[in-house]
Amino acid sequence: MKNPCACSEPQSCAMSSPLTRLSHITLQVSNPQKIITDLVAKYRFRVFAARGLDGVAPCQVALRNEKVVFVVNDSSSSALLYDAPDPLPSPNTACNISYEVEDVPGLCQQLVKNGCHLLVPPSQLHSDAGPVSYCVVKSILGNVRHTLLDRSRYMAAFLPGFQPIENKENDGSPASVTHIDHVTYACPRGTTPRVMEWYSRCLGFKHFPLREEEDPNQGVEISGPQIGLRLTSVECPGRAEVGKIVMAESLPQRGQNQIDQFLLHHKEGGIQHVGLLTPDIFRAARDLANNGVLFASQPTSYYNDPQKEAQILRAGFTPQQLLHFGILLDSCTKFQAQKDEGQKILLQVFAEPLFSKDSFYLELIERRGAQGFGEGNIRALWHSMQDMMDDLSQKVHEEAVTQ
Ligand SMILES: O=C(O)C(=O)Cc1ccc(O)cc1
């Protein structure tokens, strides 16, 4: 297959995306209270709507930090709205990326024509605040599904069926994060071209090259001692609020790594991490660290490397500033930059897994004109995450032995 957009219907290649923005990401979990507490206490999210509040614990809770919204679903509940009962590979998983769209029935027709599996057909829910239309489509990757919503005529917080929660705790301080920048999938080996083709044909995503003249079917291969990663990315051009999707595959014969570890619990692939955009990664990392978030740390050798040190100083920082929270910095090539002037900088740091070892985690990312993903950062992030997961595995093993 030469073209990732190798659609059976040529006109769908030219289709602009039906998605207008990413609405929220659903985490389906066995212990909702623990995740809600972590998102509130550590990541500064606020509960703003919930379902099923009549004397029992809510089965669905919506939390917000600026435009980043997570819905935490109790996986033991049989009464979940805006989602579909679909076997989950793991009791704790991020399984649904919900997007806002303009025309749910029209899009559903198109999806069915494209051979997609609708887990929930076009449906409508009302409250006094108006109607919301939605459907749920199964993606081609593992347990990932997409709720596609039109809430343009709905005038209350979140969605019908959810009760708004007044939050008086707003301390007025600026938010740490603003948007979801990207969602990264762990894909079984060899599946990326099919996943890309599905997102292109069904939801109008386009290849977003990470390197100049990148072959969309090959993506970018990042290999070396203890790293073997293939990355390919897609976006909806002109719709930054949809966010990018990054597909990550491990390369063969490199031993166990974080993609393979994730696939042990999600055999057919799934959402490995979510990148949260922040206007100030130093402030965000400090806030979250003060609240107890653990970040993957970097070896001091990363910051002592003369080239890296020069890059850091040129960007107006000191290596010590970055070292403190394990923040990585890459200057991007002109190819990945938004505008031609000035230096294009990308700053990133990975946080500890949210559910347990080897699983879903959050990333902070600050973009200063840089649109892509710096290869130097990816190598360093990979290694730091691998070290953190190996440490966590060791801890779990030691705890099991002493019990
Ligand atoms: O840099 C990012 O945020 C990426 O998404 C690239 C990436 C993907 C998978 C990994 O296990 C580590 C890094």
Image (spheres, rainbow, N blue to C red):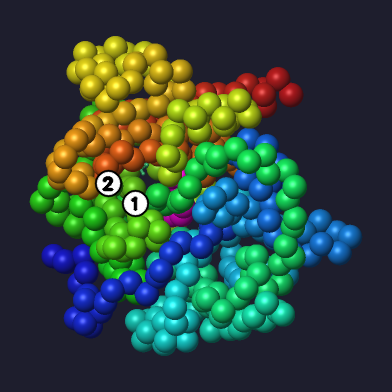
- Quarter of image, res 297: top left
Residue 371 tag number: 2
Residue 28 appears in view: no
Q: Main secondary structure of the magenta part?
A: strand
Q: Position of residue 374 (x, y in %)?
A: 26, 37
Which quadrant: the N terminus? bottom left
Q: Which residue is at a point 12% across and 47% down the rendered structure image?
A: 212
Could you say which is closer to the camera, residue 231 or residue 323?
Answer: 323
Q: What amino acid is at disc 1?
A: Val
| Mark 2 in CB contact with mark 1 (< 8 angstroms) | no
Please give the residue where the numbered disc 1 appears in the rendered image: 246
Q: Which residue is at a point 67% across and 39% down the rendered structure image?
A: 171
Element at label 1: strand
Q: What amino acid is at disc 2?
A: Gln
Element at label 2: loop
Q: Is residue 132 above or below residue 351?
A: below
Instruction: Confirm whether the magenta stretch covers residue 270.
Output: yes
386 displayed left or right of 354:
left
Find the magenta span and give its range.
269-276
Neighbours of disc 2 within 10 Å: few (<14), some (14-19), many (20+): some
Indicate yes or no: mark 1 CB to ligand 1 under 8 Å.
yes
Q: Is residue 171 above or below residue 219?
A: above
Q: Residue furthest left?
A: 213
